Image (cartoon, helix red, strand yellow):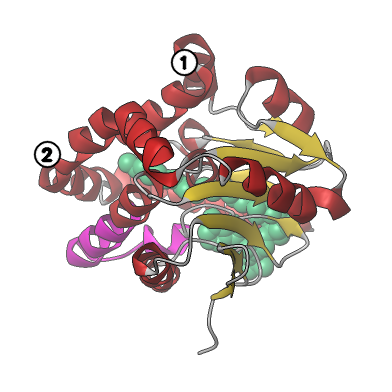
Amino acid sequence: TSPKIKVDLDNSTGVAVLRMQSPPVNSLSLDFLTEFCINLEKLEMDKSCRGLIITSTLSKVFSAGLDIMEMYGKSPERCGEFWKAVQEMWLKLYGSNMATIAAINGSSPAGGCLMSIGCDYRIMADNPRYSIGLNETQLGIVAPFWFKDTLVNTVGNRAAELALELGLLYSAPDALKIGLVDQLVPEDQVLSTAQDTMSKWLAVPDHARQITKSMMRKQTIDKLLSNREADITNFVSFITKDSIQRSLRMYLEMLKSRKA
Ligand code: CO8
């Protein structure tokens, strides 16, 4: 199978661009997440890499979030393995020592939004047709506490409460209004703006930036680290329930029928 992720590290700037290239929608399957984590780990250990930009090669979609097929009709063991990989992706990204920027060049629902808010800064294409948000409740599922914590850390408690309870997907302009993204730029400038912005982040001494980032995020990360097994058990028992499986099936059917 061809790689779902392509990484280019520019040794002169110390900036890596990670491109998600898994059609049709960069959904986060177990394979995708495993590949993502391996790449992140490699960059994290590479002393010459100081900044990471995450973007998509697909037109219109950054990432559709977790692969719903990984949560539908799968064994509890497999669901547990999948969830562990989702946790790992978030732990590695949210806790990265690198400066991280999401160059959001398309829609970014649910897990795609989690990946975006796991970065230090978000630049989104100024296209009202693209949306971003944690829409879990609309699928009849519940965003776990660490999704919630990451959102609260990004937009504050009240905006997070509204966003999560209603499962809101925000258009790019609305996402900017609530601070879910930091900047909108024309679609063809998303990556170049991310590169320019990165040079500002990298002008700050690494050690000071890293300690500060850890100060801001450590508590949130430690909360998952000390509850990892319980969080997996919780996910598996929730997602394998008949009622939740029915909700997911209805949502999948809705997704398919929408195209016609
Ligand atoms: N997983 C699997 N397949 C998907 C997903 C997905 N997340 N999203 C889209 N697909 C499939 C579609 O069904 C379609 O399949 P097919 O071609 O066989 O009909 C194909 O990908 C293309 O999709 P679209 O035609 O919809 O593509 P568009 O370009 O029109 O739209 C979007 C792209 C906007 C990304 C749209 O596909 C969309 O909204 N997708 C759904 C996104 C979503 O709601 N994701 C939620 C995933 S759940 C999650 O990430 C967090 C879960 C937390 C779990 C907590 C439990 C306790």
Relative image position of residue 115 (x, y in whole percent): 49, 48
- The residue under label 1 is 161
Q: Nearer the viewer, residue 236 or 25?
A: 25
Q: Quadrant of the C terminus?
A: bottom right
- The residue under label 2 is 226
At label 2, counting other C-alpha atoms closer than 10 Å, the crowd grade (few under 14, some 14-19, many 20 or more) is few
Q: Nearer the viewer, residue 64 or 94?
A: 94
Q: Is residue 24 above or below residue 239?
A: below
Q: Earlier in the sequence, mark 2 or mark 1?
A: 1
Q: Is residue 181 left or right of residue 260?
A: left
Q: Is residue 162 above or below residue 188?
A: above
Q: Is residue 78 magenta?
A: yes
Residue farthest to the top, as pictured? 158
- Asked if residue 128 can be seen in this view, the reply is yes
Could you tell me how far apart the alpha carbons at marks 2 and 1 are, in whole angstroms? 24 Å
Q: Is residue 14 left or right of residue 118?
A: right
**Magenta span covers which residues?**
68-86
Residue found 78% across the figure and 54% down from its top: 192
